[in-house]
Amino acid sequence: MLKIEFPIIILNYKNYSQTIGEKGLKLTKIAEEVSLELGANIAVCPQTTDIRMISNTVEIPVLSQHVDSNSPGSFTGNNLLETIVESGAIGTLINHSEHRLILSDIEKIVKKSKEHDFFTCICSNNFQTSKAAAVMSPDAVAMEPPELIGGDVSVTTKPDLVSKTISAIQDINPFTRPLVGAGVSKANDVTEALKLGAQGVLLASGFVKAKDPKKALEEMAIALINVK
Amino acid sequence: MLKIEFPIIILNYKNYSQTIGEKGLKLTKIAEEVSLELGANIAVCPQTTDIRMISNTVEIPVLSQHVDSNSPGSFTGNNLLETIVESGAIGTLINHSEHRLILSDIEKIVKKSKEHDFFTCICSNNFQTSKAAAVMSPDAVAMEPPELIGGDVSVTTKPDLVSKTISAIQDINPFTRPLVGAGVSKANDVTEALKLGAQGVLLASGFVKAKDPKKALEEMAIALINVK
Amino acid sequence: MLKIEFPIIILNYKNYSQTIGEKGLKLTKIAEEVSLELGANIAVCPQTTDIRMISNTVEIPVLSQHVDSNSPGSFTGNNLLETIVESGAIGTLINHSEHRLILSDIEKIVKKSKEHDFFTCICSNNFQTSKAAAVMSPDAVAMEPPELIGGDVSVTTKPDLVSKTISAIQDINPFTRPLVGAGVSKANDVTEALKLGAQGVLLASGFVKAKDPKKALEEMAIALINVK
Amino acid sequence: MLKIEFPIIILNYKNYSQTIGEKGLKLTKIAEEVSLELGANIAVCPQTTDIRMISNTVEIPVLSQHVDSNSPGSFTGNNLLETIVESGAIGTLINHSEHRLILSDIEKIVKKSKEHDFFTCICSNNFQTSKAAAVMSPDAVAMEPPELIGGDVSVTTKPDLVSKTISAIQDINPFTRPLVGAGVSKANDVTEALKLGAQGVLLASGFVKAKDPKKALEEMAIALINVK
């Protein structure tokens, strides 16, 4: 079975029109190609409806963008962890800035995920919430300042915040991998993030909306494997 | 392309463990068999993650249990209408009692659905909200008293409420089909619903959790085609 | 007891810093002065925490900006209708664009309010949702296009939308008063709204953030009483 | 100015009918009497609409049951921290099990509260979320197992959970006071809680719905002051 390994680039497809169904599959094949050619760890987060088709087709890890906290039962329209597991995803983002969750649900999802050996990455918005996230022992915490998400300015332009947050996450839980995201779109953003101690980056538009997604991803993947 | 025709039995799979992935596919093949053998209109609402696999495999209409109101863009973990359309669903439930929506989102989803020729069934909880739902011109309104959902007592034990609601829906919008749900699990529940003017029923556990789902559905389907 | 009479200007204080506590009381005394001097119907919607102090002090109707749908019981931090009634408010806005509610809660609040003889004004965002609101028989529906709220362009710059919506509300329920809001800040906006059939306007920043709130309100109040 | 001191009994009035307006004031006078007679620290959390009237009348600390995370501005129907401060409350519960908040809002409220020297007590549901809460440095964390809230079985029947949680909170942040709640209604519950290391208890029905609230509170207050 595929596993999440580090350092890693996690690609969030969001609800971008460029990622719907067959288009998302095509983008994922590009990500797979880059991953295999360069030996770089790359995971994708397709839209929920596309998880099964995509995870059945490619050989790179597929994560969900979100799961709901409920267990199987009388819930309508929720994205059930058990079904997402069965569909071939091997983990999930939790609490993305575009899908915030109440604290008790974040904790419940992390706990449930462990029972399914399902990778968890809690997204957080600042220093304090990154620490709160780390306390709950997810596999990773991805700190993303909301004001930079979807923009041109990389999170790495805040090196003090990034390195302080990474240290705090590691002090709290050495098994939780610190990631960063927001505004990451260039090789240099990846290099800087890793130099500051991040074990990976989370990005969306920098890949999905790139003029040439393959080239953009290749450059970032090369940066990823070149930082020691 | 498949179309929703009336009278109809709509089967909501909710997040029941009996409907996850391959199990949901198997249940759908049963529904398809019953539908084709008896010439009864039956649609299924699988879990979102399963829509594509199921709609690719069977010849009966597949609906989503829910869609989010947003358009393509920077939204993470939402169930995008466009992706659900691309995955093969031909319509959706909206505002199920286990997934209530704000009024403006209900209206937005109905409007967006029309642009995609996507069938809409707004779920409502009583007489007044059924009328409010009908005003927004969905293809169907399914009135389900919340206190009866998932139980043994059928909505048809409230004949006055049912017939009053159906009349009101039809007065407001003759093109909106009135459906009922909650506690529907037996042939007689279907017969009664149709005699009261409903053009179909919405049910979940009565099929999914039946000892013998095929037999349970067959009996309800026979009732459906026998009411004139 | 004070009653809501028409035509009316309803002033929503929102969470503006200009309306906190004593400042809100002072603004309300200005509104009272204008109302009494000109014989114009003016109601205010202070912050929840200020309702009791304000309604105890002035002789114009005080409305709540929002109430929660629950009945008395184990609910923490909710704004209970019964307590708001006891505090001296005589009605409430429901479903303001900054506090949208699920359809079933809107209906529940309207129903509960009738039992307490409590005035209800459902806010809506467009033609369709205004009709859905009117179906539930509130005392008033205030249509406010969200894109104009808080801005300089009045809802009355969309006369076709306004008059079409007002007609529809009245066709559905002759006892529900049609109001409009969004961008209303000048006498002429009030005049136009009433000429289009509105029986009042809902505004916030046009009063609260006016350079001279008294003057701004006086001009609008004069416009209100001068339209026949 | 009144201050929160420890050990303390915090009384949450919820939306109970027994606490609406004048009734809430009367209950608070009882709490004040008990507090002053016995020299026991007691704080009350009235309904938001009642905060000003109650804090103006009594000499014991008044807390809010909830505050929203937004700053002053275009927000309708929210319970603004600044207004609650102005009304005389000196702190707030955050994230009560009946009013859960997203993680980033919890953190934002704690941070904003510090700027206003406003006491914060984050409610949590288990060991892990209590630690996450403590990380954000509120003045107190009140751990309340949701399944025991409102019932007859005290949280102190889970001594291992309670003492483990209290230790963890103190390890993370020695300035955050550990409290417990859920099912607390008798003197012995208070004694047990304090012996396990809690610096106070949070309760609602045990006071509000007691046959004789004064007697019930007196017994618990005596227990509070007698534990060393």
Image (spheres, coloured by chain):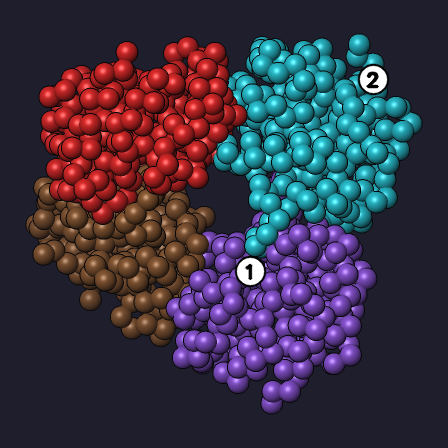
Chain colours: A red, B brown, C purple, D cyan
Tell me: residue A182, above or below residue C146: above
Q: Position of residue A178 (x, y in %)?
A: 38, 19
Seen at 62% across and 20% down, the residue is D155
Marks 2 and 1 belong to one chain: no
Q: Nearer the viewer, residue D196 or A134?
A: A134
Q: Position of residue C9 (x, y in %)?
A: 63, 73
Per the rendering, the mark at residue D225 is 2
Tell me: residue D208, above or below residue D72: above
Judge left or right: residue C66 versus residue A8: right
Task: Report whether residue C177 is seen.
Answer: no
Seen at 65% across and 62% down, the residue is C208
Q: Amino acid at mark 1?
A: Ile
Per the rendering, the mark at residue D203 is none
Judge left or right: residue C175 versus residue B73: right
Q: Secondary structure at mark 2?
A: helix
Q: Position of residue B57 (x, y in %)?
A: 9, 41
Pointer 2 local density, CA inside 10 Å: few below 14, some 14–19, many at least 20 = some
Q: Which residue carries the number 1 mark?
A: C94
Seen at 75% across and 36% down, the residue is D90
Where the N terminus of chain D falls, by quadrant?
Answer: top right
Total label count? 2
Q: Amino acid at mark 2?
A: Ile
Pointer 1 local density, CA inside 10 Å: few below 14, some 14–19, many at least 20 = many
Q: Quadrant of residue B114?
A: bottom left
Tell me: residue A96, above or below residue B133: above
Task: Report whether residue B105 is seen.
Answer: yes
Which-is-in-front pick, marks 2 and 1?
1
Chain assignment, label 1? C
Seen at 28% across and 49% down, the residue is B72
Q: Nearer the viewer, residue D129 or D23?
A: D129
